[in-house]
Amino acid sequence: MFVSIGIATYQRPQELKRLIDSLSQLKFEAIATPQIEIIVVENDSQPLTQDYCLDSQQHGSPWPIKYSLEPQRGLSYVRNAIIDNINPESDFLAFIDDDEVVTVHWLEALIQTQVKFSADVVSGPVIHLFSQVLPDWVRSANLFPLVRYPTGTKRPIAFTCNVMIRAQLLKDQKNRFDRRFALSGGEDTHFFMRIYRQGCRIVWCDEALVYDHMPSSRMTMKWFLVRNYRNYGSHSFCEKELDLWYKVFPKRFATGMGRIIIGSICFLVGIPLFFWSRKIVIEALLQIARGLGILAGLLGIQYQEYQNVHSA
């Protein structure tokens, strides 16, 4: 088996080094070691990490590293460049984010699950690591919920933060990341919702753990509100586009308005209790942001979240 591991990176040289170091520690005990290549595509005008990638290939990494520069800014462009750079003999392409690290049996678990369930796509959990002690209001409101399912669970969606895709699917030029999502994010939501509707089998692998390093710049109420607005907006936008419009619009419009109304009521109720418990107010604001995002998505409005990069 031949697996390509794709990494999209932008102005995160230290984080990229940390990720490649973790990939160097991959172990295969239950299956034969596959043929592996690492593809790093830097989304910048200058090759900031090229020397490191070449040096790692010569002195550190047990796997060959292929480096490429994608000057056109945006997640869709850099992910498509990764697809264009995979070896023609590759059986699977695994995506991992540049601010993550993998566990030693990460790839082995993905491969085992793919074989057992004959999956076209296998995705796994992301566990957050924090550079500072979480503020009380973040912990009390459970703002970083851990999403996990039993291995083998069929899923209608996956995300590029931890996923492995059958390479055969990517030989079809239609199966690319939509450039409209380049700076808004949601390109992976659209991609996996699209191929799921083509009949692709997406399953969950709970043993394929990766860790995500969360920078302190994200520990703000503004970031949580924007992220929830964008996530719900992207999903709504994709549903409107990929499914029957006249079925999606009434349902999602009602859902969005419901979240805004309920969130507004809870906000007013929670204000007098704010100094004793912030949870009610925070959840109310998040519900309003989610509702606004759903409505924005239905109207085709996309927030350009990735104009800026969050570094650890």
Image (cartoon, rainbow, N blue to C red):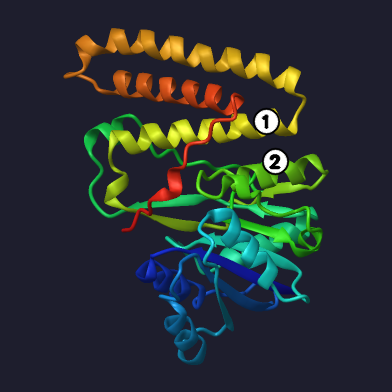
| Residue 69 position within the rendered picture, expressed as x and y whole percent measured from the top left | 53, 72
Q: Is label 1 in contact with label 2 (beta carbons under 8 Å)?
A: yes
Task: Name which quarter of the figure residue 194 lies in.
Answer: top right
User: Under tag 1, what secondary structure?
Assistant: helix
- Return the residue nearer the eye: 105 or 194: 194
- Return the residue nearer the eye: 270 or 81: 81
- Up-down: is 58 above or below 264? below
| Residue 65 position within the rendered picture, expressed as x and y whole percent measured from the top left | 56, 81
- Residue displayed at 28% across by 48% down: 217
Question: Label 1: few (<14), some or many (≥20) within 10 Å?
Answer: many
Label 1 belongs to which residue? Answer: 239
Looking at numbered disc 2 in the image, what kind of residue is underneath it?
Met
- Return the residue nearer the eye: 168 or 164: 168
Can residue 47 be seen here? yes
Q: Kindly report the distance in space between the C-alpha atoms of the residues bearing marks 1 and 2.
A: 8 Å
Can residue 153 be seen here? no
Looking at numbered disc 1 in the image, what kind of residue is underneath it?
Glu
- Residue displayed at 16% across by 19% down: 275
Label 2 belongs to which residue? Answer: 193
